[in-house]
Amino acid sequence: MADRGHGDLIQPDLVDQLIDFLAPTVIDLLDRIDGEEFTTVQFIELMQSEPGSAAAYQEALRRWGEDEHRAKMVIHGQVIPGILRRTPLVEWAGYAHGEHDPYAVPAWWTLKSPR
């Protein structure tokens, strides 16, 4: 594995592992979410509001292995959006202009029916 401390910020194998790790948590939340659409920021806030999903989020940050800011950039910008793009439960609805996330570019997601 490449040394993360020397500029190798892209680690596709670890990103895929984190997608596999967090996918069940994300799918569980999507199955229970109310409303028709949400932003990535709102989803991450929901994720952190429940003990089980918050613990999975923290574990994903830990598994990335860099400082918290860089880990959140990966989780917010690659892992969670990657899971959302791959699931048939939602579809990408565009960038969430004006929605603040210091770690990634947030997007709107629309829940598909029926769920």
Image (cartoon, helix red, strand yellow):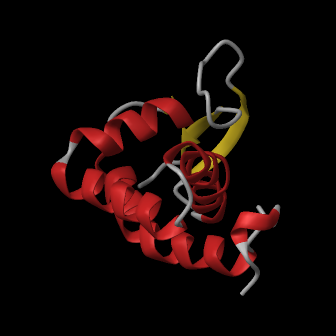
Nearer to us in this view, 42 or 31: 42
Q: Residue at the bottom extreme?
A: 1
Q: Residue at x 44, y 74 (%)?
A: 21
Query: Residue 56 in the image: x percent, y percent?
Result: 32, 62
Tell whether 62 sits left or right of 41. left
Q: Image height check: is 90 above or below 36?
A: below
Tell whether 78 sits left or right of 10. left
Tell whether 15 sits left or right of 6. left
Q: Image height check: is 2 above or below 104?
A: below
Q: Image height check: is 14 above or below 93?
A: below
**Res. 6 image quadrant:** bottom right
Q: Residue at x 64, y 65 (%)?
A: 86
Tell whether 49 sits left or right of 84. left
**Residue 99 appears in the picture as rendered:** yes
Q: Residue at the left extreme?
A: 51
Q: Residue at x 63, y 54 (%)?
A: 74
* Quarter placement of the C terminus: bottom left
Nearer to us in this view, 59 or 23: 59
Q: Residue at the front extreme?
A: 6
Query: Residue 104 in the image: x percent, y percent?
Result: 67, 37
Nearer to us in this view, 64 or 39: 64
Query: Residue 91 in the image: x percent, y percent?
Result: 65, 47
**Res. 62 image quadrant:** bottom left
Q: Image height check: is 89 above or below 45?
A: below
* Quarter placement of the N terminus: bottom right
Q: Residue at the right extreme?
A: 7
**Residue 39 appears in the picture as rendered:** no
Q: Residue at x 53, y 51 (%)?
A: 67
Query: Residue 20 in the image: x percent, y percent?
Result: 51, 77
